[in-house]
């Protein structure tokens, strides 16, 4: 009997232990390795560092590390500008997403109940189709002589071809397009629960629709606004595919910088340093997001 | 609650919003039937690019690799994610719970470039050859977190008294799990699996970091083709993928709707 409870307890302990161990080995440890490489950059040649990379095929890379650290210092300006521009692009995109997403979420929440499930499914469906393909679709639309130019010229709105591809505008369009479901769904979730009688009461008491929107709807939708904004802002800061395919060479973004350090310059320590920089930028929004999520899960309970 | 009414503004924003979401995809599908090699100039209807697609061995090979990675990693992620969800909802405060929650939520919001790079540096550090298995392990790690969240939300809203009743009647925990808990959370496990599968099929960034010789996935292939310019073959491949996914999502929705209706009928 004793033995049975012991085995039972052991097997019960496996439930948290297995995923815990998996994430520990494949998420936490890799993360610590990045941290270590980026922090011990100048000390890579020192003994405490060497065992980790001794067996690697890229050992030759690290012989030139002093030079790479030097360039990191010299070109520090580049990383600083890339960070600033990533945050700016992500912030502007998040604002645009709110402007585009709110009316859609509001319309969905006001739609007759029997259509709502269908509308939610229709918002989610594009998310299931490949992200890369959805961005790729915009290349054909935005390129010079592309479908947008053709359409606008056909209806006589423009006479000269518009060239949006490879500009920051294209990046904004891409981010808004790709992240729209992430903004609309949290907004819809809070707007759908909203009590309409509050709005009616305000209108009865003589408030203008505009004023009641700002004093009632917006504050009540705040949890959705915060969740949606963070859900879009955080990945947008580290976005790679969108600025790479739609942006121009002057569109600086830190995710793209990391990619090129790694793949084009083959500078792994510098790429790790950029990764840490990106993470430092995102730590505060990620922590806020986690709190918001935890609170949401608590209220759901 | 009073009857809600759609205003003109509401309808307009819905129409424009959905047009914005669907028009680019629709255009891509339409232009995959374009006879012209120039992707943005309509040259008549043709299915030639679909034929070219199936004769393109490199692309077919990449599709096969992607499918295998997605199936394997989604299966692993479903098992791990379900266990993690059970741990978070049924185990109260176990040691290191805060760290565990953090590790579950972080990969979902963490930029993919960081996840990809850190996993690669790990595989290099432990001298693990890059290729099929590194992509699979990387995808499992990322997608299990999504499975956890999906299954966890189902476990939280469900009626614990059924489990308790089974235990009171003498069913051992494992039997209770398989005969009571599992059937009840099965839809969310299926949803989690599908989500994991789609995310894996779709991933470019993490796969690019962790790929190796002989393990080129479809997104990597598409990405390198797109970098060289638009190609009608990529249009055809994209349209096919969109078609498959749309069919899959619609049938999954219908199946879950049927099962909901059946369980409702049984409840009455």
Image (cartoon, rainbow, N blue to C red):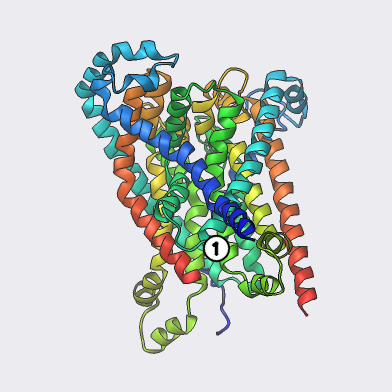
Instruction: Classify A227 as above or below A126.
Output: below
| Residue A209 at least partly seen | yes
Say above or below: B9 vs A72.
Answer: below
Is disc 1 surrounded by few (<14), some (14 to 19) or many (20+) residues within 10 Å?
Answer: some
Residue found 48% across the figure and 76% down from its top: A194
Question: Which corner quadrant of the image does residue A248 belong to?
Answer: top left
Residue B79: x %, y % from top left: 63, 47
Residue B227 located left or right of residue A93: right
Q: Nearer the viewer, residue A80 or B169?
A: B169
Residue lying furthest left = A74
Number of numbered discs present?
Answer: 1
Residue A180 in percent (x, y) is at: 50, 52
Chain assignment, label 1: B
Instruction: Tell me the residue at 54%/32% (across/down).
Output: B204
Residue at horizontal 75%, vertical 28%? B50
Would you say A89 lies left or right of B211 here?
A: left
Apparent side of residue A198 relative to residue B173 in the rendered image (left or right): left
Helix, strand or loop for disc 1: helix
Q: Nearer the viewer, residue B247 or A158?
A: B247
On the question of residue B40 being in view, the answer is no
Query: Residue A129: percent from the left, percent from the top?
Result: 62, 43
Q: Residue furthest front?
A: A2
Q: Which part of the image, by quadrant, shows the N terminus of chain A?
A: bottom right
Res. B214 image quadrant = top right
Point out residue A118 in the picture as x, y percentages from the top left corner: 66, 62
Which residue extends farthest bottom?
A: A205
Residue at 53% x, 67% y: name it: A107
Q: Which residue is mark 1?
A: B90
Q: Is residue A209 above or below residue B44?
A: below
């Amino acid at each position: 009997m004793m033995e049975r409870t012991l085995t039972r307890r052991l097997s019960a302990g496996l439930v948290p232990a297995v995923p815990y161990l998996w994430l520990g080995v494949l998420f936490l440890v890799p993360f610590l390795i990045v941290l270590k490489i980026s922090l011990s950059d100048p000390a890579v040649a020192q003994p405490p560092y060497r065992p980790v990379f001794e067996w690697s095929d890229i050992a030759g890379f690290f012989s030139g590390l002093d030079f790479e650290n030097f360039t990191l210092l010299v070109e520090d300006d580049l990383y600083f500008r890339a960070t600033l521009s990533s945050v700016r692009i992500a912030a502007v995109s998040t604002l645009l997403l709110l402007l585009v997403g709110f009316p859609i979420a509001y319309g969905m929440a006001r739609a007759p109940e029997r259509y709502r499930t269908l509308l939610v499914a229709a918002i989610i469906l594009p998310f299931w189709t490949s992200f890369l393909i959805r961005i790729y679709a915009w290349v054909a639309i935005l390129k010079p002589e592309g479908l947008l130019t053709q359409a606008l010229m056909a209806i006589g709105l423009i006479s000269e071809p518009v060239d949006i591809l490879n500009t920051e505008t294209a990046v904004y369009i891409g981010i808004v397009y790709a992240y729209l479901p992430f903004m609309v769904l949290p907004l819809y979730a809070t707007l759908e629960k909203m009590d309409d009688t509050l709005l009616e009461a305000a209108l009865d008491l003589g408030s203008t629709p505009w004023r009641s929107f700002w004093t009632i709807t917006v504050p009540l939708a705040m949890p959705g606004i915060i969740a949606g904004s963070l859900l879009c802002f955080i990945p947008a800061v580290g976005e790679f595919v969108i600025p790479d395919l739609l942006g121009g060479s002057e569109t600086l973004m830190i995710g793209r910088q990391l990619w090129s350090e790694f793949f084009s310059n083959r500078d792994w320590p510098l790429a790790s340093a950029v990764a840490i920089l990106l993470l430092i930028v995102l730590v505060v929004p990620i922590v806020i997001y986690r709190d918001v999520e935890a609170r949401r899960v608590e209220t759901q309970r | 609650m009073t009857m809600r009414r759609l205003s003109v503004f509401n309808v307009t924003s819905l129409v424009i919003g959905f047009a914005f979401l669907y028009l680019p995809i629709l255009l891509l599908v339409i232009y995959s039937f374009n006879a012209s090699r120039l992707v943005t100039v309509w040259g008549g209807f043709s299915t030639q690019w679909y034929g070219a697609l199936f004769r393109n061995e490199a692309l077919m090979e990449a599709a096969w690799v992607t499918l295998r990675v997605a199936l394997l990693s989604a299966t692993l992620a479903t098992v791990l994610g379900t266990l993690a969800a059970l741990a978070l909802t049924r185990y109260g405060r176990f040691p290191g719970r805060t760290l565990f929650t953090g590790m579950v939520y972080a990969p979902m919001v963490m930029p993919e470039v960081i996840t990809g790079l850190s996993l690669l540096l790990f595989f290099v550090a432990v001298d693990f050859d890059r290729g099929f298995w590194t992509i699979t392990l990387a995808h499992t790690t990322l997608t299990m977190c999504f499975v956890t969240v999906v299954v966890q939300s189902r476990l939280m809203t469900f009626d614990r008294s059924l489990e308790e009743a089974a235990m009171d009647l003498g069913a051992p925990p494992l039997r209770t799990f398989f005969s009571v808990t599992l059937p009840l959370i099965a839809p969310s496990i299926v949803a989690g699996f599908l989500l994991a599968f789609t995310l894996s099929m779709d991933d470019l960034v993490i796969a690019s970091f962790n790929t190796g010789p002989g393990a080129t996935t479809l997104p990597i292939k598409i990405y390198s083709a797109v970098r060289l310019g638009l190609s009608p073959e990529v249009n055809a491949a994209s349209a096919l993928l969109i078609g498959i996914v749309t069919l899959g999502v619609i049938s999954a929705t219908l199946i879950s709707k049927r099962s909901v209706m059946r369980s409702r009928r049984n409840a009455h």
